[in-house]
């Protein structure tokens, strides 16, 4: 679950900071990309170079000395998960109050990713009513806590306040990132297929892959394990398994090998291809007057026909009213059909926004306003998650 995930490790000033070096190593071993932010007092306990050597990235240690003009927002946006380990009483207090007075608290305040806090302090400080009040506040703000444990503390003391072990933090991180996805595998198709006429020309369409890639990105953020079969080279989250294809036949062949609990078919697959693809470039003097077309395989239909049928979301690219799409939803036997009018400004092909209508199995519709494709992807996953929950 940590493979390809982007983890920001915030190290604050306690003797347990040395354990965070091992935590960083375990995160890297698990396949995560790890970046580290260190508070001034963390640097009193462990050197930045240790984390640089382990993670391959130089830790950020100041709000102002980094190359980035805004290191806190840049790191916060990058992260899929923020781990604060060790988290001192002072850091926890600032988090509870929403104070952004230093690198760590500003980064945490800027983060929209989930935050996992591993407190570490002396027993008296942990049990203090102020700390407990702050911990209650973190919980009610939706932050996740791991530990503290009972055991040896700094200065030979023994009691509650020992930071959770790296393996416990790793396990907590995995289960947060898995979220409600429950280990489900997702297949997404994206982009427009290109059906060759000769080595130079093809029959194609205007799909950029933006919609399908946004759906794949959102699925990973929600903890699904994602395979994206795409004709597009747009960047995607590193945790996504990407298989590049060009033609409808290639997409069909690749998809048939991908096991999935949920399939979202956002690709614009050509319905027809040239019956003959010429091996060498056709010259004008060859005098080609027409191109004979033949039907391509229906990728969506092959997924719907599986004996272990996933939850299937189809798309309908239309240039008129929703009626044709309602009929298509029934004919294609999908669990959900996402209709978009590709002739509407701001919708459909190669736009950053889309206006879609959800069509359920029973033909009921839900119209959404014009949204960014990332927002449309969120709505699609909200709908899938709620229907899967109902089924369970
Ligand atoms: O990629 P973007 O530029 O962001 O544009 C997004 C989009 C407009 C391509 C997307 O939102 C969209 O509508 N995708 C589906 C396009 C399409 O092919 O629609 P359709 O109505 O022709 O096909 C219906 C469904 O059958 C689709 O899920 C399609 O993936 C699938 N299909 C179609 C033909 C075929 N041979 N195999 C298929 O699997």
Image (spheres, rainbow, N blue to C red):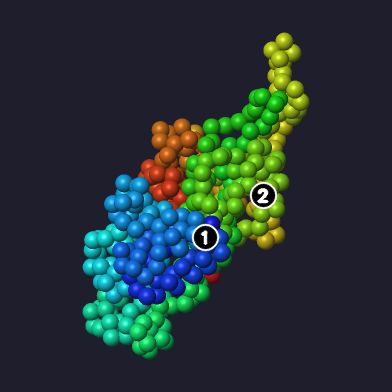
Tell which quarter ligand 1 is in.
Answer: top right
Residue 340 numbered mark, or none? none
Q: Nearer the viewer, residue 124 or 352?
A: 124
What residue is shown at x 23% (from left), y 79% (from top)? 130
How many dots with numbers? 2
Q: Is any part of residue 354 visible from this angle?
A: yes
What residue is shown at x 35% (from left), y 65% (from top)? 43
Q: Nearer the viewer, residue 14 or 35?
A: 14
Mark closest to the chain's N terminus, 2 or 1:
1
181 lies left or right of 87: right
Residue 163 locus on image (x, y percent): 40, 78
Is the shortest distance between ligand 1 and the CB of mark 1 under 8 Å?
no
Q: Nearer the viewer, residue 27 or 134?
A: 27
Dot 1 crowding, Cα within 10 Å, few <14, some 14–19, many 20+ = many
Dot in front, 2 or 1: 1
Is the shortest distance between ligand 1 and the CB of mark 2 under 8 Å?
no
Residue 146 locus on image (x, y percent): 41, 76
The quadrant the N terminus occupies is bottom right
110 lies left or right of 52: left
Mark 1, secondary structure of its residue: loop
Q: Which residue is mark 1?
A: 32
Give the distance between the C-alpha atoms of the residues marked 2 and 1, in whole angstroms.
Answer: 27 Å
295 shown above or below 32: above
The reply to whether the C-beta atoms of the residues labelled 2 and 1 are less than 8 Å apart is no
Q: Which residue is mark 2?
A: 255
Residue 328 locus on image (x, y percent): 57, 44
Residue 178 locus on image (x, y percent): 50, 65
What residue is shown at x 35% (from left), y 88% (from top)? 157
Residue at the extreme top: 285
Q: Is any part of residue 172 visible from this angle?
A: no
Mark 2, secondary structure of its residue: helix
The quadrant the C terminus occupies is bottom right
């Amino acid at each position: 679950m940590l493979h390809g995930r982007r983890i920001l490790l915030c190290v604050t000033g306690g003797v347990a900071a040395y354990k965070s070096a091992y935590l960083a190593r375990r995160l890297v071993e698990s396949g995560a990309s790890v970046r580290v932010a260190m508070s001034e007092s963390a640097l009193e306990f462990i050197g930045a170079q240790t984390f640089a050597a382990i993670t391959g990235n130089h830790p950020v240690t100041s709000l102002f000395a980094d190359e980035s003009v805004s290191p806190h927002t840049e790191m916060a946006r990058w992260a899929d998960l923020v781990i604060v380990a060790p988290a001192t009483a002072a850091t926890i207090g600032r988090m509870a109050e929403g104070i952004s007075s230093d690198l760590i608290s500003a980064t945490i305040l800027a983060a929209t990713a989930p935050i996992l806090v591993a407190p570490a302090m002396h027993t008296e400080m942990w049990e203090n009513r102020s700390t407990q009040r702050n911990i209650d506040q973190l919980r009610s703000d939706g932050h996740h806590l791991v530990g503290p444990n009972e055991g040896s503390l700094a200065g030979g003391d023994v009691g509650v306040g020992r930071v959770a072990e790296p393996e416990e933090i790793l396990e907590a991180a995995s289960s947060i990132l898995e979220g409600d996805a429950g280990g489900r595998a997702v297949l997404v198709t994206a982009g427009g297929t290109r059906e060759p006429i000769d080595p130079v020309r093809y029959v194609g369409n205007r799909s950029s892959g933006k919609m399908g890639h946004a759906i794949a990105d959102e699925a990973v953020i929600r903890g699904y394990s994602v395979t994206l079969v795409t004709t597009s080279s747009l960047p995607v989250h590193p945790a996504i398994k990407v298989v590049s294809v060009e033609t409808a036949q290639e997409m069909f062949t690749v998809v048939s090998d991908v096991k999935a609990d949920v399939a979202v078919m956002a690709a614009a697959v050509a319905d027809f291809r040239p019956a003959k693809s010429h091996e060498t470039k056709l010259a004008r003097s060859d005098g080609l007057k027409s191109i004979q077309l033949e039907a391509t395989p229906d990728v969506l239909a092959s997924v719907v026909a599986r004996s272990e049928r996933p939850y299937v979301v189809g798309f309908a690219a239309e240039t008129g009213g929703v009626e044709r799409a309602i009929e298509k939803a029934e004919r294609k036997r999908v669990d959900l059909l996402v209709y978009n009018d590709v002739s509407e400004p701001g919708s459909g092909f190669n736009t950053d926004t889309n206006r879609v209508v959800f069509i359920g199995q029973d033909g009921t519709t839900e119209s959404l306003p014009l949204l960014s494709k990332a927002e449309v992807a969120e709505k699609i996953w909200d709908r899938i998650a709620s229907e899967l929950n109902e089924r369970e």
